[in-house]
Amino acid sequence: MDEKRLVELEIKLAYQEDLLQSLNMVVCDQQKQIARLEETCKLLNERIKNRVEPQSINQGVEIPPHY
């Protein structure tokens, strides 16, 4: 009986190690995705900050009479 119980525990341990490795890979992939998203957000924020205001473009320019 002790031998059977030991084998069952070893099997459970093997499944848990496999699951842990799979979950670790998922977490690593998610961390890479988060890093990419953070970089994208940073770039978009910089574009927004550097964007020229539409009002400043039209200052000093007359609207054509057909408008």
Image: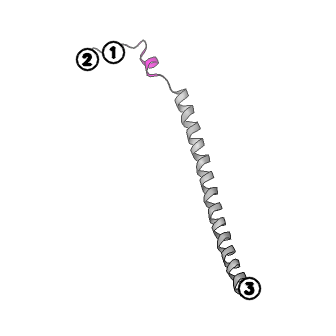
User: Is 52 or 28 nearer to us in this picture?
Assistant: 28
State which quarter of the image contains the N terminus: bottom right
Task: Report, in whole angstroms, how far the alpha carbon at label 1 lies from the one at label 3.
Answer: 92 Å
What mark, if any, has residue 42 been given in the picture?
Answer: none
C-alpha distance separating marks 2 and 3:
95 Å
Looking at the rendered structure, the secondary structure element under dot 1 is: loop
Image marks 1 and 2: residues in contact by CB distance under 8 Å:
no
To which residue does mark 1 refer? Answer: 63
Q: Which residues are magenta?
A: 53-62
Q: CA distance from mark 1 to mark 2?
A: 8 Å
Q: Earlier in the sequence, mark 1 or mark 3?
A: 3
- Residue that label 2 marks: 66
Q: Secondary structure at mark 3?
A: helix
Q: Are there few (<14), some (14-19), or many (20+) residues within 10 Å of tag 3? A: few
Residue visible at 27% across and 14% down in the picture = 65
In the displayed structure, would residue 37 be above or below residue 54? below
Q: Quadrant of residue 11?
A: bottom right
Which of the two discs, 2 and 3, sits closer to the camera?
Answer: 3
Q: Kindly identify the amino acid type of the residue bearing the numbered disc 1.
A: Ile
Count residues near mark 1 (Cα–Cα under 10 Å), then give few for <14, some for 14-19, many for 20+. Answer: few
Q: Is residue 37 left or right of residue 11?
A: left
Q: Earlier in the sequence, mark 2 or mark 3?
A: 3
Name the residue rendered at 59%, 47% in the picture: 36
Three-letter residue code for mark 2:
His
> Which residue type does callout 3 highlight?
Asp
